[in-house]
Amino acid sequence: MSISAPVTGTPADTEAAPDAVISLRGLSVDFPVGGLFSRTVVRALRSVDLDLERGEILALVGESGSGKSTIARCIARLERPTAGQIVVDGVDVLRSEPRRASREFRSKVQMIFQDPFGSLNPAHRVGQFLERAAKLHGRATDPGQLRELVENLMATVDLPVDMLDSRAFELSGGQRQRVSIARALAMDPEVILADEPTSMLDVSVRIGVLNLMRRLRDERGISMLFITHDLASARYVADRTTVMFAGELVESGVSTALMARPAHPYTQLLLSAVPDPLRAGSYDPVERARLRAAVLDSPTCPYDGDPDQVCSRTEPVRHDVGPAADRHWVRCHLYRPAADVASRALAVDTVDG
Ligand code: ADP
Ligand code: MG
């Protein structure tokens, strides 16, 4: 993608934000595909700038394949970026001394997954998982302390203490996710990266886990990156929401503001699938199917208003949307600051220029 000098809009910050616990700058990940000597790559992330602020819950939304997990995996250092910076608590972790960084990291940043016990022995007891994590972190020195710590963790995630003797396979999905959150808490983290933690849960159970996440933020000040493809969950739990499309961040803002006035056609598409009494009539299944096909077929933005393909020639700049308090911006050539965004909705064909 060629990039011409932006003439309008808000340039992305180049320095880590002072109030951010994690700042990503220009984070790019290319995955080689097609064998050893192939030069073909999948551009999973394209120069992502993202700030997770201290004590906030930030939702990262986008459909499957948009690059959400790759962001979390880079922050958790399970993936090495092709380019860019990851700054945690002011430390550029890719450049700092590896052993020190990884030791500090392991406890500071904890990740929870969609299927928490997917990679663990289902026959192990809950108590074993939690004690092991607490021991690893060195938080308890004698058995009595360890027991007390583990019991406190169970209370924190609203599970009965006698469940410490249960085996993983005996638990429900919601209980497993609470255990995995307890295990993360055993490390006393500053940040939790939660990758689709509620996607496999029924709605009523899901709300319980989302409430738990919010309580952990409120009571312990833990910052959370909440990855989901479910905008209703994002709106419910996250202070801010950022939308990813094809490896790029296309829109971001205070969750309520972003979802009330989505400015990017892709955000509008995602929202069109969310039942919302306030947006009655917004769901047009035929238009959604057409746009969804266009999105999935396109390596870049399909909304660039043919025949010009302006997005493939010029990187869209950031535009602020609405009042500053909404912290709402969009990167889209179709955005017209004066236009009534809601009425433009999905009518891409009618936009001129
Ligand atoms: P999401 O979590 O939003 O579903 P991912 O971050 O998992 O998206 O993937 C982003 C893109 O990178 C996808 O096109 C995916 O196929 C590709 N990808 C992810 N991991 C790898 C890998 N290890 N090798 C090759 N391609 C990958
Ligand atoms: Mg994923």
Image: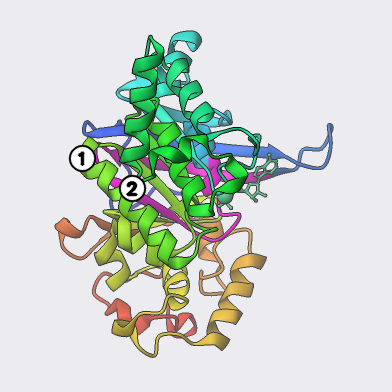
Residue 324 position, x and y percent, is 16, 57
Question: Dot 2 corresponds to which residue?
Answer: 213
Q: Residues within 10 Å of mark 2 (few under 14, many from 20)?
A: many
Is residue 319 left or right of 186 when viewed as pictured? left
Q: Secondary structure at mark 1?
A: helix
Q: Is residue 44 visible?
A: yes
Please report the residue visible at 61 percent of the width from the left and 54 percent of the height from the top: 65
Please report the residue visible at 35 percent of the width from the left and 88 percent of the height from the top: 280
Q: Tell me which label, 2 or 1, sits earlier in the chain.
A: 2
Is the C terminus in the top left, top right, bottom left or bottom right quadrant?
Answer: bottom left
* Chain part drawn in magenta: 42-70
Residue 189 position, x and y percent, is 35, 28
Residue 316 colored in magenta in the image: no
Mark 2 is on which residue type? Met
Q: Nearer the viewer, residue 207 or 251?
A: 207
Q: Is residue 319 visible?
A: no
Please report the residue visible at 28 percent of the width from the left and 72 percent of the height from the top: 260
Question: Dot 1 corresponds to which residue?
Answer: 219
State the colouring used for the structure image. Answer: rainbow
Task: Judge whether 88 appears above or below 118 on screen.
Answer: above
Q: Nearer the viewer, residue 199 or 51?
A: 199
Q: Residues within 10 Å of mark 1 (few under 14, many from 20)?
A: few
Tell me how many marks there are.
Answer: 2
Task: Judge whether 246 appears above or below 184 on screen.
Answer: below
Mark 1 is on which residue type? Glu
Please report the residue visible at 33 percent of the width from the left and 44 percent of the height from the top: 12
Residue 215 position, x and y percent, is 26, 47
Q: Locate residue 299: give its quadrant.
A: bottom right
